Image (tube, rainbow, N blue to C red):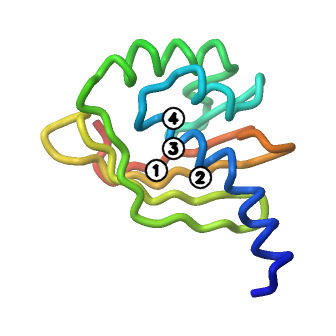
Amino acid sequence: MNSHADSCMSDIAAPVVRQFEAYNRHDLEAFLACFSDDFRSWRIPAETPSVQGKPALAAFYAEHRFNNPKLKAELISRTVVGNKVFDHELIHGLGEQPLENMAVFEVREGLIQSAWFYSANPQ
């Protein structure tokens, strides 16, 4: 792969890398800085967004994720296709066993615009 393609891939992945690191630090402010104001996410197979807007994102992570000291994401793999970043993860601390998850992030103008979450064993 040429260096231009590598540079484009790293630019697309940059906000995803930052949000992943902030997630593991439970740093809500740094986490939110990676997302657009009109961010939306879906938990597949749901057809309607589970989160709409940065205020809803902030409330969800403050109340249901970052208040859990055991919460930690483990990255299995990361793939960039166009402006999408695919993170295969294990999420620890939500249940007895790690939750296997595929997160697909759509990046526009340096921020995460949308995300889709596919869980192998939803909790």
Q: Earlier in the sequence, mark 3 or mark 2?
A: 3
* Mark-to-mark CA distance, 3 and 2: 13 Å
Q: In the figure, is residue 22 to the left or right of 84?
A: left
Mark 1 or 4: the one toward you: 4
Q: In the figure, is residue 71 to the left or right of 58?
A: left
Crowdedness of circle 3 by 10 Å Cα count: few (<14), some, many (20+)?
some
Q: Are marks 4 and 3 in contact (CB under 8 Å)?
A: yes
The residue carrying mark 3 is 20
Q: Amino acid at mark 4?
A: Ala
Q: Amino acid at mark 3?
A: Phe
* Mark-to-mark CA distance, 1 and 4: 21 Å
Q: Are marks 1 and 4 in contact (CB under 8 Å)?
A: no
The residue carrying mark 4 is 22
- Residue 9: x and y in percent read 74, 66
The residue carrying mark 1 is 118
Q: Are marks 2 and 1 in contact (CB under 8 Å)?
A: yes
- Residue 91: x and y in percent read 33, 45
**Residue at (66% x, 22% y) in the render:** 52
Question: Foreground residue, 24 or 47?
Answer: 24
SS under mark 1:
strand
Q: Are marks 3 and 2 in contact (CB under 8 Å)?
A: no
Mark 2 or 1: the one toward you: 2
